[in-house]
Amino acid sequence: MRFFVAVILAIFCVSVSAAKLTVAVTLQPYANVVSEIGGDQLEVVTLLPPGADPHTFEPKPSTLKDFAKASVYFSDGSGMDEAWLPRFKGVNKNVQIVSLSKDINWMEEDEHHHHEVESAAIHAGEKSVAEHDDHDEGEELDPHLWTSPLQMMQVARNICDALVQLDSANADLYIERWFDLTERLKKLDAELRASIAKLPQQARTFIVFHPSYGYFARDYGMTQLTVEVNGKEPKPRDLFNLAKTGKSNNVHIVFVQPQFSKRAATTIARELDAVILDTDPLSFEYEKNIRALLFAIDGNRKD
Ligand SMILES: [Zn+2]
């Protein structure tokens, strides 16, 4: 009898753990928000491994196998998320797709930002702003929305709303954790505003290889200049122009990120007598990364 009880209990436990929601996301910073809110109640599958470049990403069979386990996919609906959707759906027909970018204040891309080696699939998946009614044709949405804590607060809200709907039994837990995360993001947002307000105008421009920080710059009154031109290595003339703009804006910091080459950024830094600093906008610990970015901007200003 005791044996049967044990068996029944074991079956019950297996079925309970199988009922745990498995959520897929593409980027590490989004995985962070989902795990912060979902805690032990969720299984998170992150499709892009740390350090990988989303612009040249091709899902491996193991990635697709992981994706097949997900019952929900939190997608920003732009860039690679959109590009790889047919492949993802091919291995997981029943996955529920939830937008994490509802009510995001989107930016259009200044320049086409993909790489020379980009895949046709990424192009095919680019969400044209023309699909939204009030924009010019051909403009594309800038996918790097997570670099602004202000936009991340909205992402967190979207994720929490969805989890409450999908798994109402744990709603209280999700709401509690969302609240804590939002408090932290509000604090980060306030820190950014206060520190940037103290920066003289000429210390508010920075150079970055790839245009990852457009939302950060827009939402916090900074200016981002990029080394990359339309997703490609700059030509000598582009470097010459950037050096000129950099000089007139008193730029002293050039950021490089692990996903891209440092060669052109090093040249420009030498021209400007600027420091080269590493940043990883795709880091799982995005709050830490944003704080480090601010610390670097503030700490290296010359005014
Ligand atoms: Zn990018």
Image: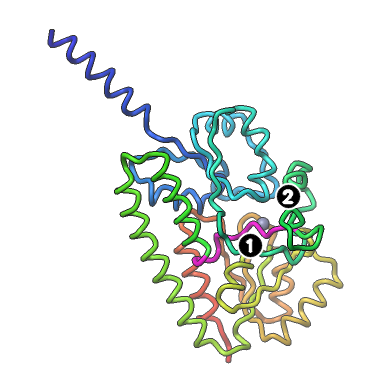
Q: Amino acid at mark 2?
A: Glu
Indicate whether 199 appears above or below 187. below
Query: Ligand 1: which quarter?
Result: bottom right
Crowding at mark 2 (Cα within 10 Å: few <14, some 14-19, many 20+): many
Q: Which is more foreground, mark 2 or mark 1?
A: 1
Please state if 175 lies on the left or on the right of 53 as rendered: left
Residue under pointer 1: 106
Task: Please tell me whether mark 2 sits on a helix, a strand or a loop.
Answer: loop
Which quarter of the figure has residue 89? top right
Residue for point 27% across, 21% down: 12
Q: Residue at x 50, y 56 (%)?
A: 155
* Residue 242 position within the rendered picture, expressed as x and y whole percent measured from the top left: 77, 76
Give the camera-side residue of 25 and 303: 25
Q: What type is the residue that disc 1 sits on? A: Trp
Q: Residue at x 70, y 69 (%)?
A: 266
Q: Position of residue 229 (x, y in %)?
A: 79, 64
Q: Residue furthest top?
A: 1
Checking the image for residue 126, the label placed there is: 2
Please state the extent of the stretch shown in magenta in the rendering.
Answer: 140-150
As drawn, is 130 to the left or to the right of 209? right
Circle 1 residues within 10 Å: few <14, some 14–19, many ≥20: some
What kind of element bears circle 1?
A: loop
Q: Is residue 129 above or below residue 118?
A: below
Q: In the figure, 52 relative to 130: above or below? A: above
